[in-house]
Image (tube, rainbow, N blue to C red):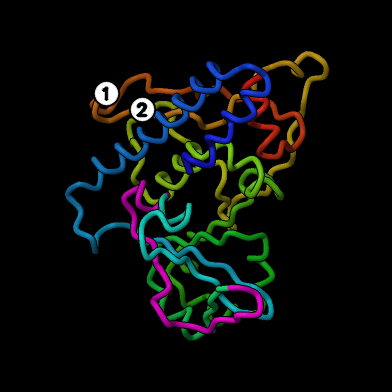
Amino acid sequence: NVATFDWIAMYAALYNLEGLSNQIAQETEDRYTCTSSNAQILSSDMAESERPTVLWANYFQGYNWSVAECRTWDESYYCEYAKHCGANIISRPEGLGFNDKSIGDFWYLNDEEMLALGKDAEIWIYPSNTWETVYESKKEILDQFKSVQNKQVYDTQGGGENMWYEQRLAEYDVVANDFCELVGLSNPYQVPRHTVKWFRNVYTDPIPGPGTCNVPDELDDRYVPVGAFCSPLAQTGGSGNGSGSGVSSLVCGQFIGIFVILALLL
């Protein structure tokens, strides 16, 4: 996650803004480290079996269920977020499911395999926009999942319909805040308390629109990610001003990741 964000340095060089780029990168990484440190403090006395368990999986029509592959903590960005926040993430066991070599090295589970693997997870993150459709066709199976019964299913439309694979890449620290908040391992004393941005509860949360922009007054304003704020438990003892900025900003359209990085710089 940190390495992906470091692309900001390349774009900064084009505008002779390396100094500002380094500052932004360091401040973002500091917030990312802050959320991890808080989670480690809060989970330090937890046995492995007591840590919150996350199911990261979605359904592909014609192929079946795709489940997280986390043989190591850094195998993918979602594995890193789970490690970062002191949570367990369910990883597809070696050899479980089937592999269609015609489309690459991707593995899929059928309904029965998926139920056995993920039914006891407290939280389900469904990284797609198809939950409602899939639920209607597989209600009998899905109603057996603890996360469904407790209405703890989240898709990735919290930032808008098409933002997860775009702007989210420039806000990895905010995603970390979100993940830690979902698993209950974020600073409970932080003021203001973090509001989850990128993950949308499919039962209670609407899909937000693109926002508004006050033209021309805001066109030159620097972009400030909503939720880029972290209070370190180790320093505040349960209070304090924290690091980063919690200032909200109006969004001028739906930036893709590159444009957001440029907006951070300019």
Counting from the top left corner in percent of width and height, residue 234 is at 24, 29
Q: Horizontally, is 202 left or right of 29 in the view?
A: right
Where is residue 265 drawn, in percent x and y?
62, 21
Residue 40, how many percent across, how many down?
26, 43
Earlier residue among tags 2 and 1: 2
Placement of 17 over or under 84, stated as above or below: above
Secondary structure, mark 1, is helix
- As rendered, which of 243 and 146 lies closer to the eye? 243
Task: Name the residue tied to disc 2.
Answer: 231
Q: Are marks 2 and 1 in contact (CB under 8 Å)?
A: yes
Q: Is residue 222 magenta?
A: no
Camera-nearest residue between 213 and 110 = 110
Q: Magenta includes 99?
A: yes
Magenta range is 81-104
Looking at the rendered structure, the kind of residue marked 2 is Ser
Residue at the (41%, 77%) spot, across then down: 117
Quadrant in which the C terminus is drawn: top right
Amino acid on which disc 1 is placed: Thr
| Residue carrying label 1 | 236
**At 67% across and 19% down in the image, what residue appears?**
15
Residue 185 vertical position relative to residue 142 in the rendered view, above or below:
above
